[in-house]
Image (spheres, rainbow, N blue to C red):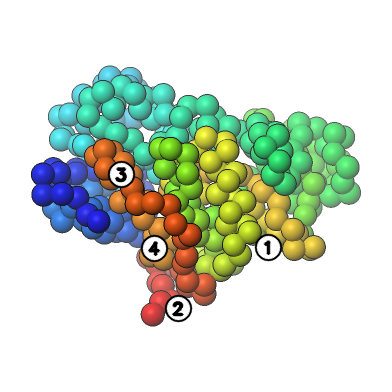
Amino acid sequence: MSSSPQTPAPRILFTSLSRKTSLYDFVLEQARAFHPEAEVIGGDSNPDCPGRTRVEEFIETPPLDQSSANEFADFCAENGFTHLIPTRDGELSFFAEARDVLLAAGVPVMVSPPDTVMVCLDKFLFASKASELGFPAIPTAETPSSLEAERFVVKERHGSGSRGIHLGLSAEEAAQRASGMEAPVFQPYLEGRELSADLYVDRSGQTRGVVLRWRDLVVDGESKVTTTFRKVEWERDLGDLAAGIGLRGHGLVQAIVDEEYQLRVLETNARLGGATPLALSCGLQSIEWFLKESAGQDLETVEPFTFPSGHRLVRDEEGRDEFSGME
């Protein structure tokens, strides 16, 4: 069900546009399924960002490190924004902390609570929290000597993605790599296949849909080729994990399937992901659900969510997506 005739058309600020024009297009499509006159404005603090000429409207946004919550609320009011969707890890903490101020100014933000964002941005805290909830997180430690492993992975503790990650190192090599990092953490090195789970958790804490996809080709932490598949047990478990850590709105859980075909959780991103367009194209209605909840509308009764297997996204060097396997 779309919006009622009395519902005003949303004017959504899509932040940190950069090259995310495929994601922008799907956000716009779902926004207009909610209201045919919805607008999505691509925003970026870089006025020359690559995507600015490929969106319906672009706006230069104030740098967050030079803004307060009240100042950003004023910016939204001056430009008529009714909703805000962050898309970059580096801005999640700001908007999580500012969400009450922005909501009071009439701008709901699709962001999780501050404590949840903090856990998602900290690999050590996330592994501890997931394990505490009974989920199979990959052990994560601040020193390699704390782990029982022959080979190690070393990565930055904060942030997400696989940039700056070093794989398959001995304990000595891992320690050497770590010496040049800001806040390294260590994990045992596992051979396996990576997957992502795009999902949406509503305001009541119920996971309304999960789309699994293999990360077939990953470059600088971003899926360049990704393919959907079904495994109901994993869909349920990863949805429960996201709800358990307090995620609200759209999120992205990353995991690895080991040589025994067991799921091992890596991290959760409390935002839309670069390859989320594939999940949105398969029926995950994250933007519509967010807009309905923001308008005070009741969402439909939670029912088993299904999606097609074998749908694939291939992204070229310019950030353009090609989809295949669609009927």
Q: Nearer the viewer, mark 4 or mark 1?
A: 4
In this view, which residue lies farthest toward the front? 301
> Which residue does the numbered mark 2 point to in the structure image?
325
> Which residue does the numbered mark 1 point to in the structure image?
193
Q: Secondary structure at mark 1?
A: strand
> Viewed as shown, does residue 283 lie left or right of 29?
right
Q: Secondary structure at mark 2?
A: loop
- Mark identifier at residue 283: 4
Q: Nearer the viewer, residue 5 or 181?
A: 5
Kind of residue at disc 4: Gly
> Quick one: label 3 or label 1, which is nearer the N terminus?
1
> Which residue does the numbered mark 3 point to in the structure image?
298
Residue 245 in view? yes
Residue 61, compared with residue 282, is above or below; it is above
Q: Position of residue 229 (x, y in %)?
A: 56, 68
Cα distance in 3D space between marks 3 and 1: 38 Å
Do tag 2 and tag 4 residues touch (Cβ < 8 Å)?
A: no
Kind of residue at disc 3: Asp
Residue at 48%, 59% in the rendered image:
304
Residue at 55%, 49% in the rendered image:
239
> Quick one: label 3 or label 2, which is nearer the N terminus?
3
Q: Nearer the viewer, mark 4 or mark 3?
A: 3
